[in-house]
Each structure stands twice: as C-alpha cells, then as structure tokens.
Amino acid sequence: MSSTEVGEAMAHQTFDTILVLDFGSQYTHLITRRLRELNVFSEMLPCTQKIGELKFKPKGIILSGGPYSVYEEGAPHVDPAVFDLGVPILGICYGMQELAWRINPENVIAGTHREYGHSNLKAQSVNGHVDRLFEGLENTMRVWMSHGDKLAHLPEGFHTVATSDNSEYAAIAHGKKHIYGLQFHPEVTHSENGTALLRNFAVGICECNQNWTMERFMEEQIANIRRTVGEKGQVLAAVSGGVDSTVAAKLMKEAIGDRFWAVLVNNGVMRLNECEQVKKDLSEALGINLTVIDGSKEFLEGLKGVEDPEKKRKFIGGKFIDFFEAEAIKIEEAAAKDPTKAGKIEFFMQGTLYPDVIESLSFKGPSATIKTHHNVGGLPARMTNGQGLKLIEPLRSLYKDEVRALGRALGIREELVMRHPFPGPGIAVRILGEVTEEKVNIARQADHIFISEIRKAGLYDQISQAYAAVDPSRAVGVMGDKRVYGYIIILRAVTTTDYMTAEAFNFPWEVLQRIMNRIVNEVHGVSRVVYDITSKPPGTIEME
Ligand code: GLN
C-alpha cells in the first residue's frame, strides 16, 4: 500500500523531533506520549532502524527499555551510526545497558535478584551541582524500576549521576558527549518527576522547541494537504460520524473545500436518528461536501437469518464496499465532468491514528517479522493498492486525545469531539444472534434512553464507551397484571484508557434505576434490564 507523505512524515520535518527507538518495552509508547504532553514532537521507530535511511534529523534520541538481555545471542542492537549523528542520546533500562554493552560487553551482567517496583533515587552533586538531567528537581525521588540485568562497571568515559538503594548506577552520564543512561523508567507515572526529567533531556539538553500544539499542527497539515493534492486534485473518503473520520474530514474541507467528498453509507444498524445527526453535523454545521446513501433496506434484508457474529461483520463489511464503490464511481464521473474542479479523484482519505501505526512498527523481537499496517480492512483494493487511488492519512501521527484537541482547534462542537467510539458493524453486533428490524428498533430506543440518562447525570465524559444490547432470550415479566415475555436489555458501560483493558463503570444506583425504569416503561417488548459488570479481560467491550 502506498501512503502519501501527509501526516506520516511531515510532522518531523516541521517540528523539532525526539526519535524513540523501540526495543520492545511495553512502556515505549509512553515515552512519546510524555514528550508530546510537553509539547515536544516525538516519533517512535523500531530499534533496527537504519540511521542512514532516516528521512529527518532528530534533535535527540531515546533508546527504550526491552525484554531482552543485551548479552544474549540474538538480542536486538541499535545501528552504531546513532552515535555519529552528534545529537544527545538517552538510554532507558535496556537502552542504558545497550550503551554500556557497546562500549564493552563485560559492562552488563545478570543481577543476583530482579528489581521490580519502587526505589529511592538520590541525585549526586559534584561541586554542589547535580547533573543537567536532574536540574530543578528534588535531590531524592521515588522512581520505578523493572530489570534483572545491571551494569557491572561504569562504561568508559561515564560517571554516576544518581544512585538508588539497589543500583549503584541508577543514572549515568558521559563526561564529554551528551549521552545519558537511566536504570529506571521516567516514562511511567509511578516515577516521581519522570516527566520533568524527560523535559530536562528534551528541552534542556536537546534544545527542542515546545511548539507541538494542535493549532500549529492544524496549520501545517492544511498546508501539507494542499501541497500533496495540488490545485485540482480531489479526495474521496468514507465517514461514519465518529470522532476520527469527522476530524479528518473537517481538516480536508479546510484544506481543499468541496474537492473533498465524504460518503456516509446508512447500513440500517446505526443509532437512533444518527444518519440525520451526521448530516446536520458534517454537512450543515461543518460545511463538508457529504453524500448520504441509504442502504438500510438491503443491509437488513441480507442480515436475515445470519446469527454468527463473524458472518454479520463480513456481510456488513462486504455490502458496505458495494455501496461505497458504486457511489465512488458516480462521484468520479461527476468530478471529471465539472470544469471548475476538473481534476481526477486521485486520493482516498482514511482516519488512521498513531496507535495503529505504532502497532505495526513495534519491535517484536529478533525473529518475529514486523507486521505491516493495514487498517483498510475490506476497502476495495483499487482504492489502496497504489494503482488506483493513493492513500492520504492526515491523523497518522496523532493519539486519540490529540485528535480530540485537533477537533476543538477546527471548531467542532464539544459533544461530537468527546463521542464514544462506535463499531463499524453498528448495533448489529449489539444484538445477540439474528438481527431483525424489531430488535434493531428496541436496541436503538434502549440505547438512546441509556445514553441520554448518562448525559443528564453528567457522567458521559467519565465513561469511555456505553451502549445497550439486546439479548433475544425472553424473560418473563408482569405488566398491568398481565404476564409478558420480553427481551432482555444488557447495559454495558466501561472505563478504559487504552481499550486493551477495561472496567465496568461504577454507576450511582439511582441512575441505573432511573434507566431501568424508563427502558421497561418506554420500550415495547422489553421485560428485563441487566447491567454487565464484566471487566476486560475476560470480557470484551462489545458483545459479539
Ligand atoms: N531485560 C533487561 C533487564 O532485565 C531490560 C529491562 C527493561 O528494559 N525494562 O534488565
């Protein structure tokens, strides 16, 4: 797949960048996060990156932690050319061991016991001064360690700048060059002053400008998109009403106006009034050139009798492509005829985010092949194989909260910017078993009540994702002295930061009761309401 320069490579050309080389630690992405919180742009690449092939010159390099032992056969090692770049280098845990091992393999040995958890760090002063890394910080702090190996000796040319209860070499620095090593992890929140220490490195030592803000990024991206697309080029995209596609679409609109074409396919399993709402938001409020196609009948027809969740997903995905392609062809023909626009549709825009990019770049070990990224999941090959449409991914360097901040900078209303994620196959995967129009209506109404009550109680932003699902097994109930059998509504609300693990949201009891009351009274065909308290793992966030 060929992806254009937009979003991928441009940020590091206009913003001072700290390059993080990943040795496979589970905390590596936290280093980039912390730096960006300091308004310093940071990008991650695998530790095997050839320095000669870098498309930019970083202001500094951080070598991350990792699960290997540097002295092991097959352990990953950094391209020695990093030391010739002449920029400051900071090694964290494995990264520090790598620095020491390079100088002399005997510098690193297996420790007698693992050190995992808190440790008290003491910065050393020389002539009354601590090292620049610790400038302005307390002289003692609690830091977080996770290692089994240790330095046996100080590498040549280095001196100790901090010690801890267990590590004689908790932090080291080179006497002449800007090379530093830390045995602890400043990037985890359990390390006091960790962010301040990273600021001392990135801003103090590497002299990075703290100008990574979403306002600046927005201006840069708009200019990049214009450069890439040219005066006449046109861009096509599928939108869903979700945060990512809305923010990306608004950015495209700002850059190239109506030469950006957004298409929304109504698949019949969207939320209550959602299609109308997306039209209002994207087309009326944000002025985006939007085409809505109503495929709801065909989708619901095709879902008849399908019970298997995978089959539901496949069917919805496949049908979506049929609708989208048919519309794309119409738009392309219309675009080709319009003399004021004239340019061909050359690009396909996608709202890929940085975590997906990181996922494919992460260093997975000496033998593991690095997975290539494809978030395209089922879009026509013509649109992504580089022969037809070229891919444009303007959010490729952003984390979710940065996308939200960019949305605000673009003037998108807060409620939209803070929307919970919603799955592509919609409420079809929130109805257990076969999807019918009746069940879709029940799920929609129950979900609408659930979400409105959550908003009314002021809890929406504390919850990461919430919805009502339909369990089609019928439970007995008594309504107006009559025995009734109705569906069971399952309420699900979770909190999570990374969507990898999640906890059920702890609702005030009266809020749950009010929701239950409204659902059984207002949604015909429901006899019970239950709240799913399963955490992830073992549960998933969605039902199917
Ligand atoms: N595997 C190395 C050790 O055990 C490095 C650990 C780390 O980077 N967290 O010391």
Image: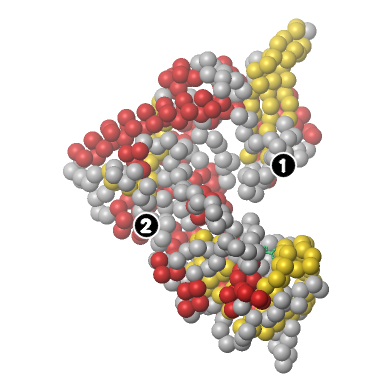
Check disc 2: other Cα within 10 Å, few if <14, some if 14-19, many if 20+.
Answer: some
Amino acid tagged 2: Glu
Q: Residue at x 29, y 44 (%)?
A: 387
In the displayed image of the protein, which residue is found farthest to the top?
A: 482
Residue placed most toward the observer, 327 or 130: 130
Q: Position of residue 438 (x, y in %)?
A: 57, 16
Residue 173: which quarter of the image? bottom right
Q: Residue at x 63, y 39 (%)?
A: 465
Residue 33: tell me if it is visible. no
User: Are the residues flagged by discs 1 and 2 in contact, CB closer than 8 Å?
Assistant: no
Cα separation, mark 1 vs mark 2, equals 38 Å
Left or right: where does residue 331 sit relative to residue 304? left
Residue at the spot of label 1: 503
418 to 140, vertically: above or below? above
Disc 2, ligand 1: is the CB inside 8 Å?
Answer: no
Q: Residue at x 38, y 56 (%)?
A: 6
In the displayed image of the protein, which residue is found farthest to the bottom?
A: 127
Residue placed most toward the observer, 311 or 293: 311
Residue at the spot of label 2: 5
What is the secondary structure assignment of the residue under circle 2?
loop
Q: Position of residue 317 (x, y in %)?
A: 45, 30
Check disc 1: other Cα within 10 Å, few if <14, some if 14-19, many if 20+.
Answer: some
In the displayed image of the protein, which residue is found farthest to the right?
A: 165
Q: Position of residue 450 (x, y in %)?
A: 66, 31
Residue 25: tell me if it is visible. yes
Could you tell me which quadrant the C terminus lies in?
A: top right
What is the secondary structure assignment of the residue under circle 1?
strand
Q: Position of residue 290 (x, y in %)?
A: 37, 38
Amino acid tagged 1: Glu
Quadrant of the image where one finds ligand 1: bottom right
